[in-house]
Amino acid sequence: MTGNEIRRKFLEYFERNGHKIVHSSPLLPANDPTLLFTNAGMNQFKDVFTGVEKRDYNRAVSSQKCIRAGGKHNDLDEVGKTARHHTFFEMLGNFSFGDYFKEDAIRFAWDFLVNELKLEESRLWFSVFEGDAEVPADDEARALWEKVGAKPERILGFGRKDNFWQMGDTGPCGPCSEIHYYMGEEPDNPEKNHPKWVNGEGDTTMEIWNLVFMQFERSEVEKGVFELKPLPAPSVDTGAGLERMTAVLQGVKTNYDTDLLMPIVEFSAQLSQKNES
Ligand code: GLY
């Protein structure tokens, strides 16, 4: 499948499941002084999550153009060091605004990856929030992954850095559950396809999808003092890198080798006459 076909497959899968296809919003967010660049699919829905804005749909799907080159989500320092960071990317995402919550978000993600894209289950790892002093461990997400078919030993707990998502210092946020893909050889060899690689060094595993269970809004009540309040209705925000998903499905080792980015690399090489790889 080409990258374009993967994007279309994602949008059509969620449209079949009651989601409204919404266009990508501009890279420069309108009316949001907290962000320089759009850094996630949920940005354009921020006020819908908090209940300030109402739309005539409560499920949406998009492929959002994003830049992560500063602020809370900064990929800039990783470019050139990993196979999967490039600051500008497209984020595939499905959203529920007070409609479905964890159970359906997890069921859709499993169904899309395993039944639609036919990814090998033995390459998939799942992470859940392990809890801290502010928010308890997400045992519910763990149980729901098991319910859809994930093996218990492939569901790992991580802390706030990896499994609690917020777009910036303030805004809607919540615990999240990520899906990681083993990129290496011999997926059935537990010595190689080992949990230590999930959120570990290098590119042996790659996060391909993040399911955020939006439950809270973080606001600054006075300078430097933040408060976490429940959202009017629990909601869902997900983000899957189109270029990462494409690398997995095209069986290449880096996002740059996909048909989404390689033509740009080749054209630049031609222009600069530096085409030795
Ligand atoms: N908003 C979900 C993510 O960026 O991972």
Image (cartoon, rainbow, N blue to C red):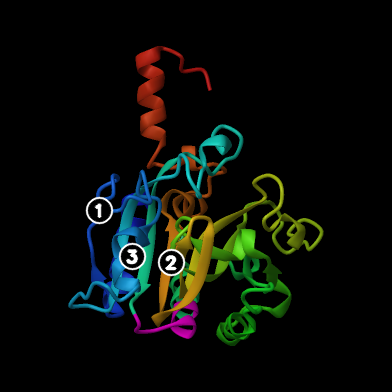
Circle number at residue 46:
3
Which residue does the image show at 62% across and 86% down from the upper left?
Answer: 143
Mark toward the start of the polypeptide (2 vs 3):
3
Q: Which residue is mark 2?
A: 238
Marker disc for residue 113: none
Above or below residue 211? Residue 108 is: below
| Image coordinates for residue 262, horizontal then vertical, percent | 41, 34
**Of the pair 183 and 70, the residue shown nearer to us:** 70
Label 2, label 3: how far apart the Cα atoms are? 13 Å
Query: Closer to the camera, 22 or 71?
Result: 71
Closest to the observer, 145 or 274: 145
User: In whole angstroms, how far apart are the C-alphas of marks 2 and 1?
Assistant: 22 Å
Q: Is residue 63 left or right of residue 247?
A: left
In the image, the segment drawn in magenta is: 98-106
- Judge: label 2 CB < 8 Å from ligand 1: yes
Q: CA distance from mark 3 to mark 1?
A: 11 Å
Indicate which disc residue 31 carries: 1
